[in-house]
Amino acid sequence: MPKKNNFEIPSSIIRTGKTLQLFSSKLAANFAIKLFTTPPKFKTPEREEMMRKSAKNILINIPSIQKDVNVYEYGFSKTKILLVHGWAGRGTQLYEVADKLLENGMMVISVDLPAHGLSSGKTTNMLECIATVEYINDKFGPFEAAIGHSFGGITLLASLAKKQFLNKLAIIGIEASNNKILDLFVQKLKLKNKVATLMKKQIRSKFEVDLESLAAITSAKSVTNPTLVVHDVQDNDVDVSSAYKIRQNLVKGKLLITNGLGHRQILRDHNTIHKIIDFLKN
């Protein structure tokens, strides 16, 4: 059985949010936005060390957001594949995928998104991550395809909705609705629904964008390249229904549904990886 969601919010943070809510829903919303845009950092597992040490690590500055991000150049081939990790992940998190791509004659460009891994900053958001993907495409592309996990898949879809720069895309375990991500986050903080409404309003005001306009279910409508939507039935982070919703909105979408791999173990399942690579090659 897959493990339950690891991203449990500490009780001290929940207490702080509830205390602020007693005084002001706006204060609670400000607090929640700060948390929402601050990815927790975890120690890199030993299993990822081989890729981290073998890859060429390149620190580059993304001018539009003035942040440095760490890029992993892994292998060498004319056929380049871009890998984008999920929230609180790292550019080496898809190491099993990367290794199999190398075995199949492709090279990998992966990245620690802003405020992740070896990249700079403590906070980030989807707009910054989209800007990062766009800049990496300009500097390291052209890419034959990209593979994105969770938040990384949402970011890739939003990037492709603006400009098609790939032939094929594979997305793994991604949520269809950004509003749902935020609503579930507020529920985990044990705050009132009003706080979620205020957060969405503040995000619109600060970033001049509606959160749902960047959601996977919205972006999918504008993505025309062949896209493989991969999801596990027992994903405890994102319900499998999201995969079907996204697939319905894609022009050239294909589903790969697995069972028993959860949200992260799926990234290390050789059978799933082989099917993804077959999709990219054929």
Image (cartoon, rainbow, N blue to C red):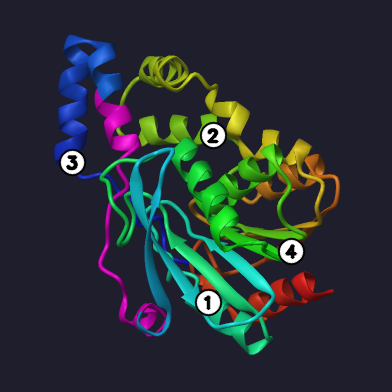
Mark 4 or 3 closer to N-term? Answer: 3
Which residues lie in the magenta part?
A: 31-52
Q: Which amino acid does the dot numbered 1 rest on? A: Arg
Q: Which of label 2 and label 4 is nearer to you? A: 2
Left or right: residue 182 versus residue 31 is right
Q: Which amino acid does the dot numbered 3 rest on? A: Ser
Instruction: Identify which residue is drawn at 53% across, 55% down.
Output: 136
Q: Which of label 3 and label 2 is nearer to you? A: 2
Q: Which of label 3 and label 1 is nearer to you? A: 1
SS state under label 1: helix
The C terminus: image quadrant: bottom right
The residue indicated by pointer 1 is: 268
Within 10 Å of the Cα at label 2, are there few (<14), some (14-19), or many (20+) other Cα atoms? many
Cα distance, mark 3 to mark 2?
Answer: 25 Å
SS state under label 3: helix
Disc number for residue 178 = 2
The residue indicated by pointer 4 is: 256
Instruction: Give percent across and percent down for residue 97.
Output: 57, 76
Which residue occupies the foreground of this view, 250 or 256? 250
Left or right: residue 114 versus residue 235 is left
The answer to whether mark 2 and mark 1 are in CB contact below 8 A is no
Q: Which amino acid does the dot numbered 4 rest on? A: Leu
